[in-house]
Amino acid sequence: MHPVAGQGLNLGLRDVAALAEVLVEAARRGEDIGSELVLERYQAWRRFDATSLALGMDSVNRLFGSDNPILSAMRGIGMGIVTALPPLRRGFMRQAAGLSVDPMPRLLTGQSL
């Protein structure tokens, strides 16, 4: 993942918290925490967030790294719209901070496992 805005770190923290949650729950149920079934639960939980973030950050990197005048104009218009609409700006900020992940791993919400 491109290091745009530290999103790889944010993703990694969500991954670690989710893995810990899956493993603790499996251990409480007496499951083998290394079993394929347990690890598939983790993978299924994290797949959408990881894939969508990687694709989104790649798109942002390509959009902002391009010298194409049409893309440059679109960037300017898009940034102007985001700046002018506080609810849209807050939505982008929540997304960038990883706060729109559902379900959010409990460790990242301050809850204990």
Image (cartoon, rainbow, N blue to C red):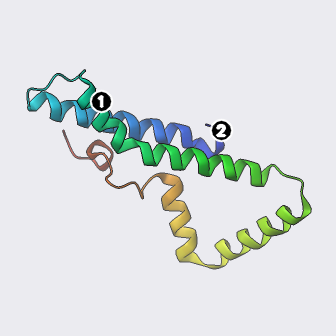
Q: Residue at x 65, y 44 (%)?
A: 4
What kind of residue is marked 1? Leu
Between 37 and 28, the one lying in front of the other is 37
Marks 2 and 1: which is nearer the front?
Answer: 1
Residue on which disc 2 sits: 2
Horizontal and vertical percent for residue 26?
16, 31
**Apparent side of residue 99 relative to residue 111 in the rendered image (left or right):** right
- Estimate the x, y position of residue 21 in percent, counting from the top left: 24, 37
Residue 60 disc label: none
Find the distance from the CA under tag 2 to the CA under tag 1: 26 Å
Question: Which residue sits at x=61%, y=37%?
Answer: 1
Quadrant where the C terminus is found in the figure: top left
Binning the other alpha carbons within 10 Å of mark 2 as few (below 14), some (14 to 19) or many (20 upward) gives few
Q: Residue at x 77, y 65 (%)?
A: 75
Q: Which residue is mark 1?
A: 39
Q: Residue at x 79, y 68 (%)?
A: 74
Above or below, 53 relative to 3: below
Identified by mark 2, the residue type is: His
Q: x%, y% of residue 3?
A: 64, 38
The residue nearer to you, when weighing 92 against 59, is: 59
